[in-house]
Image (tube, grey):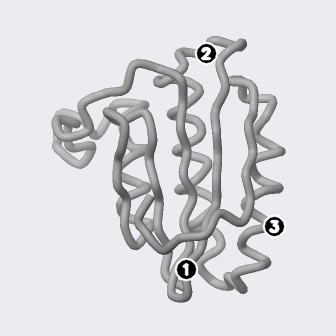
Amino acid sequence: MKEGFTVIEELSIPSNFESMPKVETLIDTVCFKMGVGESFGNVLIAVTEAVNNAILHGNRNTTNAQVFIKSAENPGSFCFSVEDEGMGFDYTTLPDPTAPENLEKENGRGIFLMKNLADEVEFENNGKRVIIYFNK
């Protein structure tokens, strides 16, 4: 996470999809505090995609693993950090989901969605942590 951000909410969930309502409640709470209006859907989709990826790809559905979610703000923006306990991944070599050979695939659009719905996305800790930034 960039310097100058203050953590405002934190959540740790077991690595299973039954925990998603807690994540959605966190997103609702943060967006309400930030006064998010029309862009709420973008925030919801981007962050839930990050958590889904952490559960499915990072922790590989290992139910005793955790996903750690933090939200933070500075005067001009806010962010969500999502971290898993997996091995990480090379986020620099992802296939383009808009390439003709990938259009029919069921998976592979999560990071593409995050990058297109947020103002900025960065990866840390060998891809185990994604930080999704939104302007206020």
The N terminus sits in image quarter: bottom left
- Residue under the point 72% across and 86% down: 35
In terms of image quadrants, where is residue 95?
top left
Q: Specify the label residue 66 is tagged with.
A: none
For marks 3 and 1, the one nearer the N-term is 3
Mark 1, secondary structure of its residue: loop
For marks 3 and 2, the one nearer the N-term is 3
Residue hosting label 1:
74
Distance from label 3 to label 1 (Cα)?
17 Å
Q: Nearer the viewer, residue 13 or 18?
A: 13
Give amino acid for label 2: Asn
Residue hosting label 3:
29
**Residue 69 placed where, x, y %?**
64, 46
Mark 3, secondary structure of its residue: helix
For discs 3 and 2, the disc positioned in front in the rendered view: 3
- Residue under the point 75% across and 45% down: 11
